[in-house]
Amino acid sequence: MPLHHERRGTGEPLLLITGWTISSAVFEPVLDDYARHFECITYDHRGSARSSGTPPATMAALADDAAALLTALRIPRAHVYGLSMGGMVAQELALRHPARVRGLILGGTTPGGPFAPRLGPADVLAIARGGMEERGLRAPLLFSPEFRREHPERVRELVRHFTAHRSSVAAIGAQTLAGARFSSLPRLGRLRAPTLVMHGERDRLVPLAASRLLAARIPDAELAVVPGAGHAYALEAPQESLDLLLGWRERRLPRSRPSEEAHVAPTRSSGS
């Protein structure tokens, strides 16, 4: 399998899908917490970070890669949790391969297309100004102002995970094109997997209205807003975010029978 991937923990499989040009190292600060409840599968997108191959330029191809990884790991079905651009991949995976998705979690993401809420020019300019003041865009884009002010050392530590294993120019271009082409809004009514839509209340990168739209259009979806948190809510408010996910799972997804999700015992990691 050309995708760099790792498996950690025990329990029902949880496929974690990372965002735009970012390696799966971004999950490291919270992965042990999730691994106490799930068998977590993380991976880098094809041609990005530590994975080999030609970078795909469509969400459909990225979703097919995710389904192929599950097949290679002999996992029939998994909970699928996509964050930011990973949430677009997760939507496409659930639409193209519905039998592979037991539960769908969409974090800080959007349905894309011309009618989805997006940042206006004034928002982009404000973020850019904040980034120049803080000598870099990543912290203002990712975390709430309060978290950056009250926990500067923690912010610096977390940002290092976003910059680990940088992607090539080709991967950046391909994933940018995939995001620009993506639109799920007309197809959301076809989703049948139990769905949780999560968003940070103070997200400055993807408007909260985008998640409200997803939750309104996906049949029987739930919306969970993480109070006070920014785009990287799962890192900024790790316990609150995990509790929301576990509470939703207990309400909506009865535990599967052992035979239903049977798969081979994992090796702990695999490179590209």
Image (spheres, grey):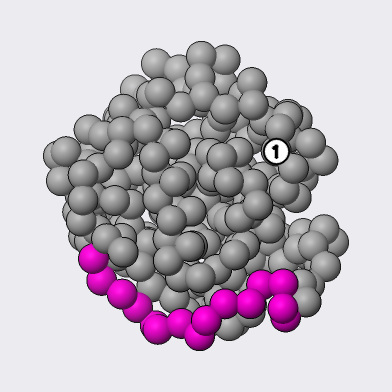
Would you say 83 lies left or right of 242 here?
A: left
Is residue 265 visible in the rendered image? The answer is yes
Numbered disc total: 1
Which quadrant does the C terminus fall into? Answer: bottom left
Task: Tell me where residue 213 appears, x and y as whole percent.
Answer: 68, 28
Q: Residue at x 39, y 44 (%)?
A: 62
**Residue visible at 63% across and 77% down?**
262
Q: Residues within 10 Å of mark 1 (few under 14, many from 20)?
A: many
Q: For mark 1, give the secondary structure.
A: loop
Residue wearing tag 1: 191
Q: Position of residue 260 (x, y in %)?
A: 72, 72
Residue 244: % across, % down: 71, 60
> Looking at this view, is 10 or 165 the one in front?
10
Magenta-colored stretch includes residue 171: no
Q: Residue 47: where, in percent of width, then height?
A: 23, 49
For the N terminus, the image quarter is: bottom left
The kind of residue tagged 1 is Leu
The residue positioned 51% from the left and 19% from the top of the image is: 113
Q: Main secondary structure of the magenta part?
A: loop
Residue 53 vertical placement versus 171 (above, below) = below
In this rendering, the answer to whether 205 lies above or below 247 is above
Residue occupying the far left of the picture: 169
Residue sitting nearer the eye, 193 or 84: 193
Please state the extent of the stretch shown in magenta in the rendering: 258-272
Q: Is residue 271 magenta?
A: yes
- Regarding residue 232, the answer to whether it shows in the image is no
Q: Quick one: 183 or 200, which is closer to the camera? A: 183
Q: Is residue 25 above or below residue 185?
A: below
At x 48%, y 53%, the residue is 67
